[in-house]
Image (cartoon, helix red, strand yellow):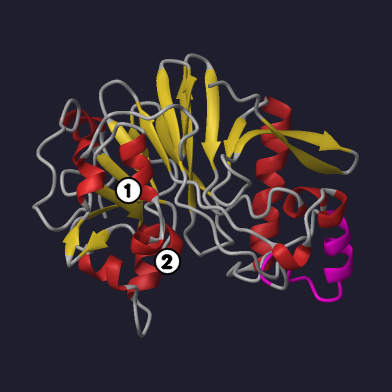
Amino acid sequence: MSKVSRRQALKLLGTTGAVAAAGTIPTMAQQAPAMPNGAGFYRFKLGDFTLTVLSDGQTPPGNAFPNWGANPGRQAEFEAALREHFLEPTQFINNFNPMVIDTGRAKILIDTGRGQAGQLLNNLANAGLRPGDINIVFITHGHGDHIGGLVRDGQPVFANAQHIIGETELQFWLSQATPPANLVALRDRFTRVRPGAEIAPGITAVDTPGHTVGHLAVQVTSGGRTLWHLGDAGGHYILSLRFPDHYLGFDNNPQQAVATRARLWQAAAAERIMVVGYHFAWPGVGYVRRAGNAYEFVPAFFTF
């Protein structure tokens, strides 16, 4: 296991390099004229850093439950809460929100979306970026909708980047009878880190287990401001805040996931930490505030 040292991070600074070999990345992803903000991406500032949430697309409408509320006997209550927010539970649409952090010296991509089923590369290009521009790829956890864009045709999509994942998380997935192919393909490229590791100056891995055994969120700090990219530690942007005991059908350890979310919500609300949720309603950027004995997600005021 090796932690990401400041020296390792600095070695990446200013590195852009050539785009991956022809045939591995769609031609459209090699184009770099930026589209207007909001065209499949949302760009904003956090202190001196520039953050860009990238849409990897949406799922077709489908049933929200039991995946998005697996507590036995609670579905009717959860359905009512969604309808209060003008959402039909049988027409649930899921979002996928990776993010690029541009520190001015390195570009860090958090999660890679679903691969060919998604829109990450298209919207990376819309944002004026190419796969070869990415210096670091950080994986929050090993579910397919977060690692699907790591590899194409057997080659790494972000060929110039250092790849980072939690040590516990990678060990868990590689120990499975059928481990995820993309993690197997890149197992020797991964730098394996523990909670608290510095990914790059101002960017730190945060211990958020429960959704998976070694899930890591990302803390970004610049200019006196802090943001968390929650990965899937945030769960659902309405139900996981309104109902303190709410858990997802794909939480590996529901009790641990609930405890992790309670800790995140308490700190985010008390310290006014901005959050980005991977599956929150696009673009998933906002704040958390107290609402009685629970919490609410408050979308940020978007500027274009």
Q: Is residue 109 left or right of residue 134?
A: right
Disc nearest the viewer among 1 and 2:
1
Residue that numbered label 1 is attached to = 121
Apparent side of residue 63 relative to residue 124 in the rendered image (left or right): right
Residue type for callout 2: Gly
Residue topped by disc 2: 144
Q: Amino acid at mark 1?
A: Leu
Determine the CA span between mark 1 and mark 2. Answer: 16 Å
Q: Position of residue 296 (x, y in %)?
A: 78, 40
| Image coordinates for residue 245, horizontal then vertical, percent | 79, 59
Residue at x-position 44% and y-position 51%? 56
Residue at 81 percent of width and 76 percent of height: 72
Q: Which of the 4 quarters of the picture holds residue 250?
A: bottom right
Q: Earlier in the sequence, mark 1 or mark 2?
A: 1
Q: In the visual, does 241 lie left or right of 260?
A: right
Please tell me whether residue 282 is drawn above or below residue 51 in the rendered image: below
